[in-house]
């Protein structure tokens, strides 16, 4: 049983999407920094136990659920209906290319993710107004100073215009290139809308927000099978499971991407939240590689060399994408430095262990 009084002696954080890959790692980081953390998701983390002080299985498309969990003590009387110091909004309907780019899930992706963001911002705004009301502020029902909770929103590089990413050798993903808008998927359109939504609530209701555009985050404890896994995990799985048959690659293998190791992503999130810059800002690596090069790293990690086949009609997204880190260097004085080869080596080791466990079962 958690001692609920502990939360009032520490900074508090609410992580929405805490059962997901990035949210799970973020909870662990916040706990290591001394935060009291509540995690919320439709599911718990798949591969380990959450480090959160509290974890609730809630559907965040339900407005009433959101209105409850954004208060630190929703199960307590009025005097405990306090605000979190920080909210990290990572909850979304998402997946890899096999889920996002087929077109078969567009309605769910757009509706579910947009509804969650609308509910979160509306609930936070109403709570802010409640705790700042003169009658509440003058009462003795609480013993803390009302604030406007800071909210982090995780957008995606998928919101960048498709026409800027047709050349695999020279994609343009500078933050200012977002307009005129032309994302290559409905997932990207929803992310672009939600960015503007968070910034509008900042402008109109003085809610401190931080907006980041993620570029292909990967690493241990991430989804590695089932159809929603990202390219690095899929390649590591295919190599680990392979016993000599040809390795299938979606597309012609010359499409380019950059991939950011999970530890670097979490560091960037925390630096953005601690700083003054609202964003949007890229959180990604600028080490651009072809998909064939990504496979090379996975094969090297698995000490294998495999024949390759190319599925040209498979979903593959834009031809080229790479994080432009000019702005994050300027605003945060930081950029990732972890190499893709080392990250794939660590990720392959973990996925290979998962594959072996599955075989034993």
Image (cartoon, rainbow, N blue to C red):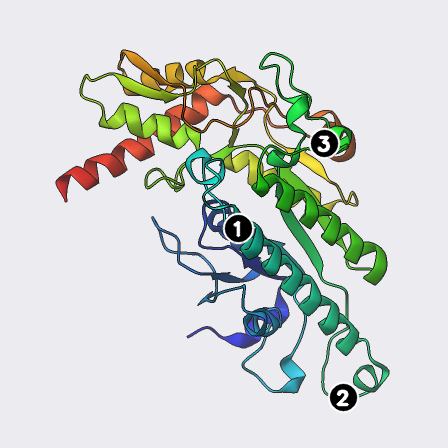
SS at mark 3?
helix
* Residue denoted by label 1: 107
SS at mark 1?
helix
Whether residue 333 is visible, yes or no, is no
* Residue denoted by label 2: 140
Dot 1 or dot 2: first in sequence order is 1
- Name the residue located 26 percent from the left edge and 38 percent from the top edge: 354
- Name the residue located 48 percent from the left edge and 22 percent from the top edge: 340
- Name the residue located 44 percent from the left edge and 19 percent from the top edge: 341
| Rendered view: 67 above or below 109 | below
Compared across the picture, whether 127 is left or right of 315 comes to right
| Residue 54 percent coordinates (x, y) | 47, 67
Give 249 or 299, whichever is nearer the viewer: 249
- The crowding category of the residue bearing disc 1, from other C-alpha atoms within 10 Å (few below 14, some 14 to 19, many at least 20), is few
Dot 2 or dot 3: first in sequence order is 2
Compared across the picture, whether 139 is left or right of 320 comes to right
- Name the residue located 65 percent from the left edge and 19 percent from the top edge: 171
Give 339 or 127, whichever is nearer the viewer: 127
* Residue 328 tag number: 3
Question: Marks 3/1: CA distance?
Answer: 33 Å
> How many numbered tags mark residues here?
3
Instruction: Name the image quarter holding residue 159.
Output: top right
């Amino acid at each position: 049983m958690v001692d609920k009084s502990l939360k009032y002696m520490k900074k508090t954080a609410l992580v929405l999407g805490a059962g997901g890959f990035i949210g799970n790692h973020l909870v662990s980081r916040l706990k290591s920094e001394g935060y009291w953390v509540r995690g919320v998701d439709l599911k718990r983390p798949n591969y380990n136990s959450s480090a959160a002080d509290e974890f609730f299985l809630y559907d965040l498309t339900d407005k009433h659920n959101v209105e409850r969990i954004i208060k630190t003590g929703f199960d307590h009387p009025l005097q405990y209906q306090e605000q979190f110091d920080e909210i990290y909004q990572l909850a979304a309907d998402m997946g890899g290319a096999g889920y996002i780019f087929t077109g078969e899930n567009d309605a769910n992706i757009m509706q579910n993710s947009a509804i969650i963001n609308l509910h979160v911002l509306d609930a936070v705004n109403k709570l802010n107004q409640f705790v700042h009301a003169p009658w509440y502020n003058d009462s003795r029902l609480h013993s803390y100073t009302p604030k406007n909770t800071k909210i982090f929103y995780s957008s995606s590089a998928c919101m960048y215009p498709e026409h800027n990413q047709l050349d695999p050798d020279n994609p343009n993903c500078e933050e200012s290139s977002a307009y005129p808008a032309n994302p290559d998927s409905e997932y990207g359109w929803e992310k672009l809308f939600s960015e503007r939504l968070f910034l509008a609530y900042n402008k109109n209701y003085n809610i401190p927000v931080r907006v980041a555009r993620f570029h292909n985050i990967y690493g241990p404890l991430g989804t590695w099978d089932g159809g929603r896994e990202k390219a690095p995990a899929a390649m590591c799985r295919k190599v680990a499971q392979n016993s000599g048959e040809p390795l299938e690659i979606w597309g012609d293998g010359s499409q380019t991407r950059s991939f950011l190791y999970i530890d670097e992503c979490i560091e960037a999130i925390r630096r953005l939240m601690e700083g003054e810059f609202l964003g949007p800002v890229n959180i990604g690596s600028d080490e651009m590689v072809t998909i064939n090069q990504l496979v090379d790293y996975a094969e090297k990690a698995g000490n294998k060399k495999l024949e390759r086949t190319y599925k040209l009609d498979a979903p593959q997204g834009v031809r080229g994408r790479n994080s432009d880190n000019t702005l994050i260097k300027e605003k945060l004085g930081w950029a990732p430095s972890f190499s893709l080869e080392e990250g794939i080596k660590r990720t392959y080791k973990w996925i290979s262990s998962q594959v072996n466990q599955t075989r034993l079962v």
